[in-house]
Image (cartoon, grey):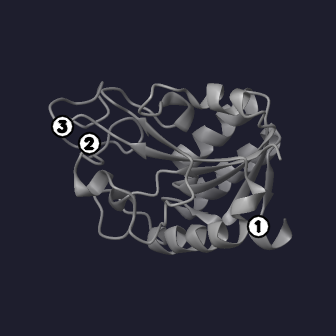
Amino acid sequence: MTRALFIVDVQNDFTEGGALAVTGGDAVAAAITRHLQSHRGDYEIIVASRDWHHADHDNGGHFADGEPDFVDTWPVHCVADTAGAEYDPELDTAAVTHHVKKGQGIPAYSLFEGTTDEGESVADLLSAHGVVDVDVVGLATDHCVRASALDALAHGRRVRILTDLVAGVAASSSEQALAELAHAGAEVTTTAQV
């Protein structure tokens, strides 16, 4: 088995009621939990990422000083050790083999920009476990899911985006992201089709 599952940023601040809530975030969390219950054995490793920003500064300009532009600057979100940075309660993380924190003091969108608490990079994890194929799920389709999937492709992995296990900030930008990923070589599919 050489497949990994990437669960990208399914956190309270990105689901309903959070600082940067994505519509459908709670439903995605619950759907990923159901997927794990029936498909845990399909994956060599399961990597879950979280934004984990510092509270005491702007994280390299990631937190807006004034009005955010929602492109490069954002409202305060996913501050380390706060409820907003924790996984959504609908996501059961019992099957997760590796937890990755990213954005610690800097802007970060891809889970490849993070590390485990032991300091392991995602690229090293994939190589150590002989992972060739990666399924990508989580939040948000048009930002961190997109960046993580593009980085997986850049690292020479075959990538599937499971579209019934993602949600984006906006429909149009999510469609653009999925089209970009397909053009880059990712398979855009659903859990029912795999």
Give me the residue at 33% from left, 57% from top: 13
Give me the residue at 28% from left, 56% from top: 84
Mark 1 to mark 2: distance in Å? 32 Å
Tell me which numbered mark, 1 or 2, is placed earlier along the sequence: 2
- In the rendering, at what x and y percent does residue 100 appear? 47, 39
| 3 and 2 marks in contact (CB < 8 Å) | yes
- Between 79 and 130, the residue placed more toward the observer is 130
- In the rendering, at what x and y percent does residue 148 appear? 60, 40
Q: What residue is disc 3 on?
A: 55
Q: In the drawing, does residue 150 fall left or right of residue 57?
A: right
Q: In the drawing, does residue 167 fall left or right of residue 105?
A: right
Give the crowd class for mark 2: few <14, some 14-19, many >=20 residues within 10 Å. Answer: some
- In the rendering, at what x and y percent does residue 19 appear? 28, 57
Query: Which circle marks residue 80 in the picture?
Result: 2
- Between 175 and 115, the residue placed more toward the observer is 115
Camera-side mark, 1 or 2: 2
